[in-house]
Amino acid sequence: VQVFDNPETASIDVAHKIAQLIKKKSAQGEKVVLGLATGATPVLVYQELIRLHQQEGLSFKNVITFNLDEYYPMQPDAAQSYVHFMKQQLFNHIDIDMNNVHIPDGTLPEDEIAEFCLSYEKKINDAGGLDLQILGIGRTGHIGFNEPGSAPNSGTRLVTLDDLTRRDASRDFGGKDNVPRKAITMGIGTIFKAREIVLMAWNEKKAAIVKKAVEGEISSEVPATYLQLSDQVTFILDKDAASAL
Ligand code: GLP
């Protein structure tokens, strides 16, 4: 666990860790495989990465990305889609090859999703596996959209969103009734295969769930507690999110 004074300094630290990884692997002629997250939490990380690209020439030409999740159903051009979010917050401002960008497809007919999820896992493996996965945490203790009840070895799949998650998303959708009931998410098992995992949390609103995730009994009731089982995980917190530890 690392605690920073504020989300800005914490985010800069995470962005610089990502930049180091990109520079190191690019210098060796290797691809870098990043697992990316949405939500408010990683926005400042993406802003710093954009700054590093624009002002210091950091290139994303060797970077392959896999996003954690997408609402289902969801059209990519909808304002609430994670495709839209990632373009706005990061991809439109850097030199990444969009063929190297992967985000779960919220447009598929339901009977094609299982096959899509297997191919998503395969693409991650074929790319060499995730070098680094960044995560936020939902107030249900979800990582990605792995809600309470998710199994530790779960793979990418269609899930049903928790009521609290839908309530937390209601502002983006103009009311809870408009929030999709389902999502496609990487599984806990998928996330765990990453060689390094960084979970970020800011704000007092996250203090209670951060305490459970870091100190609570490991249980499927709070999927983020599974992270206690891995040596590859760092919790990056601001003072407020760490205030109950
Ligand atoms: C969404 C995302 C999660 C994210 C969580 C927290 O549910 N699917 O990946 O971690 O929200 O969101 P925020 O960062 O806005 O608090």
Image (cartoon, helix red, strand yellow):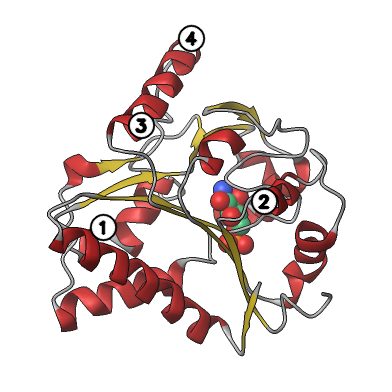
Q: Quadrant of residue 108?
A: top left
Residue at 31% across, 64% down = 21
| Residue marked by disc 1 | 91
Sequence order check: which comes first, mark 1 or mark 2? 1
Residue 175 rendering spot, x and y as whole percentages: 66, 49
Relative to 182, 105 lies left or right: left
Closer to the camera in the image, 35 or 27: 27
- Dot 3: what SS? helix
Q: Are marks 2 and 4 in contact (CB under 8 Å)?
A: no
The answer to whether one can see residue 174 in this image is no
- Dot 1: what SS? helix
Q: CA distance from mark 1 to mark 4?
A: 30 Å
Q: CA distance from mark 2 to mark 3?
A: 21 Å
Relative to 223, 178 lies left or right: left
Sequence order check: which comes first, mark 2 or mark 3? 3
Sequence order check: which comes first, mark 3 or mark 4? 4
Residue 63 rendering spot, x and y as whole percentages: 23, 53
Query: Quadrant of the image for the N terminus?
Result: bottom right
| Residue marked by disc 3 | 125
| Residue marked by disc 2 | 227
| Residue marked by disc 4 | 111
Q: What amino acid is found at the position of numbered circle 1 in the picture? A: Phe
Label 2: few (<14), some (14–19) or many (≥20) C-alpha neighbours in 10 Å:
many
> Is the C-beta of the residue carrying label 1 under 8 Å from the nearest atom of ligand 1?
no
